[in-house]
Amino acid sequence: MAVLAAVLAVFAFVGAATVHECAKLSRECEVNMVDIAGALEMFAYDDGSGSYPESLDDLLPYYFLDIPVCPGGGSYRYKLKAEDGEEYILECTVHGSH
Ligand SMILES: [Zn+2]
């Protein structure tokens, strides 16, 4: 019985560590997305028209040297929502839109 309890304790520990790591990556991903959102706002402001860029690549090289990469292996999907370019969708393929 003590062996079973020890085995369960090890599994619980490994499980908790994995969850902790996931939460950490998710937070880092969220920080990236906040950075990207900030750059999008600056782009729209500097553009004068208030329009967001067609693609995240338009943020290079003035706002980013490289677009941040999700630490959890996801990629960022960016899409203009409205034709006038005043709304956008930004989400991570792993972590969603946070
Ligand atoms: Zn992510």
Image (spheres, rainbow, N blue to C red):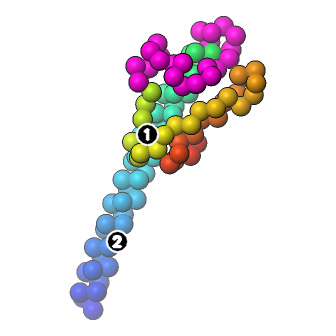
Amino acid on which disc 2 is placed: Ala
Q: Where is residue 55 in the image (x, y as percent from the top left)?
A: 58, 24
For the N terminus, give its image quadrant. bottom left
Residue at horizontal 27%, vertical 80%? 7
The CA span between labels 2 and 1 is 27 Å
In-front residue for pair 16/54: 54
Q: Tell me which secondary structure the magenta stretch mostly adopts.
A: loop
Question: Is 49 within the magenta?
Answer: yes
Relative to 68, does residue 26 appear above or below in the rendering? below
Q: Does the residue labelled 1 lie within 8 Å of ligand 1?
A: yes
In-front residue for pair 66/12: 66
Q: Where is residue 22 in the image (x, y as percent from the top left)?
A: 41, 53
Q: Disc 1 on helix, strand or loop?
A: loop
Judge from the rendering whether residue 69 lies leftward or rightward of residue 34; answer left or right: left
Residue at horizontal 30%, vertical 76%? 9
Relative to 49, does residue 96 appear above or below in the rendering? below
Residue at horizontal 71%, vertical 22%? 85
- Dot 2, how many residues are within 10 Å of its Cα: few (below 14), some (14-19), or many (20+)? few
Relative to 54, does residue 32 appear above or below in the rendering? below
For the C terminus, give its image quadrant. top right
Quick one: label 2 or label 1, which is nearer the N terminus? Answer: 2
Residue at horizontal 51%, vertical 34%? 33
Q: Is residue 65 visible?
A: yes
**Residue linked to disc 1:** 70
Which residues lie in the magenta part? 45-66
Q: Disc 2 on helix, strand or loop?
A: helix
Amino acid on which disc 1 is placed: Cys
